């Protein structure tokens, strides 16, 4: 249910209305390239903050039965900041960026501790099912509220609203309420395993650094893991950039707001069944090969985005993104589990999650900077091809059989 709760932020705010509103209402609508740069910078800054905090917060939570406390603290912070976007006046893009970054930190920080609760609520035979069910509910929950918000935006008079701007502002409030309401089940019904080894903040920082150093040392001994993580860092950065910057790019091409929102809805509802189908596809051709195909598909989508001219083209690209978005994320996680030692899974996945946060840094900044320097949003989106190309080349070098053998030998030592 927490997936159901906070996915509303990912859809309505992060991918949908914030980029739209930022470009037209808070920033200078006459300088779209500059606003693209600021939006990319905001997304990158939020990711850096969360990634930098992750090992230290994890050290505290792991040793003090504090996962739920941190989850709810970050969620509360994100909820308040999201609702606060409603009160940012027109033209105050600096305040909008600050509140958006803060809300994104609350969203991403809460997810770190939400993920860490999974081993405590499901045994190994049920953990994949529990994780997949959460993912599915996230698509549905986030999509349903986003659909309501879109209807508010397209038909404001039906909801007793004066205009589209008011509808978007109230959408931010609706996300905050939705996020808070459906976080209650986590607070009331999820039990966290008791650990009575509380550590002070100063010691937790030291433990966080030690854990990070230990993981990096182990990765050096497992070359295949290190190579996969490097490949993952590049291609998942490209995926995240497409998700976060698609609406901004569409606005730069002067597409209608209603078309951009419709495209986001298409992605949301195509991605859920497509993720399940792509999992079946991977079982037929192999997980690594399926990821490689998904990376090539994203590269092709990016190239098509450069030549895109009409809103119909945007809808076609939305369908294509939906076909591969869930699959590439889920398969990357499952492939990673095959390359790491079982007894070190928690440590390695902690690093995997932290790397995922850093993966959202380079792409938005790259796209925003190239757009600002060239004055051309098409070249900005084309620059993301670099990330997919590097990720694909590196993944091709990952030897899965060797990685599994090295993981077994690592444990034997």
Image (tube, rainbow, N blue to C red):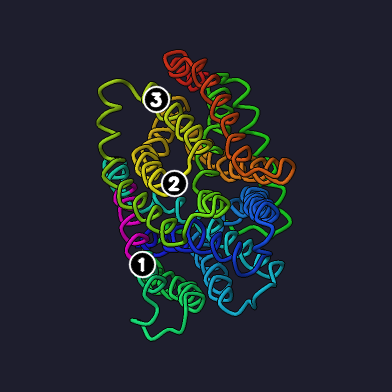
Residue at mark 3 to residue at mark 1: CA–CA distance: 32 Å
Which stretch did the figure color magenta? 131-145
- Occupied quadrant, residue 226: top right
Q: Position of residue 155 (x, y in %)?
A: 36, 75
- Position of residue 149 in the picture relative to residue 372 (left or right): left
Nearest to the eye among marks 3 and 2: give it: 2
* Residue 231 magenta: no
Q: Residues within 10 Å of mark 2 (few under 14, many from 20)?
A: few
Instruction: State which tag comes first along the sequence, 3 or 1.
Output: 1
Q: Which mark is residue 310?
A: 2
- The residue depicted at 56 percent of the width and 31 percent of the height is 385
Disc sitting over residue 293 in the figure: 3
Between 93 and 307, the one nearer to me in the picture? 307
Residue under label 1, please give it: 145
Q: Give the x, y percent position of residue 73.
A: 55, 68
Residue 188 is at least partly visible in this image: no
Looking at the image, which is closer to me, 262 or 47? 262
Using the numbered discs, state the Cα–Cα distance from disc 3 to disc 2 in whole angstroms: 26 Å
Against 366, is 158 above or below?
A: below
Q: CA distance from mark 1 to mark 2?
A: 27 Å
Q: Which label's residue is closer to the chain start, 3 or 2?
A: 3
Q: Dot 2 lies on which element? A: loop
Q: Earlier in the sequence, mark 1 or mark 2?
A: 1
Vertical arrangement, residue 277 with respect to residue 405, above or below: below
Does 65 sit left or right of 217 as displayed? left
Q: Residue at x 43, y 54 (%)?
A: 117
Residue 341: x and y, percent? 47, 27
């Amino acid at each position: 249910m927490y997936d159901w709760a906070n996915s509303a932020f990912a859809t309505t705010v992060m991918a949908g209305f914030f980029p739209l509103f930022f470009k037209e209402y808070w920033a200078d609508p006459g300088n779209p390239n500059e606003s693209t740069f600021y939006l990319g910078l905001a997304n990158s800054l939020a990711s850096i903050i969360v990634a930098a905090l992750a090992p230290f917060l994890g050290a505290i939570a792991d040793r003090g039965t504090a996962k739920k406390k941190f989850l709810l603290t970050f969620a509360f912070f994100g909820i308040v900041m999201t609702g606060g976007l409603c009160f940012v006046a027109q033209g105050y893009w600096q305040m909008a960026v600050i509140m958006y970054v803060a809300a994104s930190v609350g969203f991403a920080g809460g997810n770190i501790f939400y993920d860490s609760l999974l081993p405590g609520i499901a045994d190994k035979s049920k953990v994949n099912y529990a994780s997949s069910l959460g993912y599915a509910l996230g698509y549905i929950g986030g999509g349903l509220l986003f659909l309501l918000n879109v209807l508010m935006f397209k038909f404001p008079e039906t909801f007793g609203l004066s205009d589209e701007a008011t509808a978007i502002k109230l959408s931010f409030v609706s996300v905050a309420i939705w996020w808070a309401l459906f976080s209650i089940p986590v607070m009331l019904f999820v039990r966290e395993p008791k650990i009575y080894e509380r550590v002070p903040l100063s010691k937790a920082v030291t433990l966080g650094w030690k854990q990070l150093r230990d993981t990096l040392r182990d990765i050096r001994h497992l070359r295949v893991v290190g190579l996969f993580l490097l490949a993952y860092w590049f291609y998942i950065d490209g995926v995240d950039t497409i998700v976060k910057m698609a609406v901004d790019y569409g606005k730069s091409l002067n597409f209608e707001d209603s078309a951009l929102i419709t495209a986001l809805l298409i992605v949301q509802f195509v991605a859920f069944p497509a993720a399940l189908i792509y999992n079946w596809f991977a079982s037929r051709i192999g997980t690594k090969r399926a990821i490689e195909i998904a990376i090539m598909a994203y590269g092709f989508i990016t190239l098509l985005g450069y030549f895109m001219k009409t809103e119909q083209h945007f809808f076609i690209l939305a369908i294509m993104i939906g076909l591969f978005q869930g699959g590439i994320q889920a398969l990357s996680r499952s492939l990673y589990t095959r390359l790491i030692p079982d007894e070190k899974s928690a440590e390695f996945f902690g690093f995997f999650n932290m790397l995922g946060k850093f993966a959202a840094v380079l792409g938005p900044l790259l796209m925003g900077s190239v757009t600002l320097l060239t004055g051309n949003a098409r070249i900005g989106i084309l620059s993301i091809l670099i990330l997919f190309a590097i990720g694909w080349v590196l993944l091709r070098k990952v030897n899965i059989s060797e990685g599994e053998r090295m993981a077994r030998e690592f444990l034997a030592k």
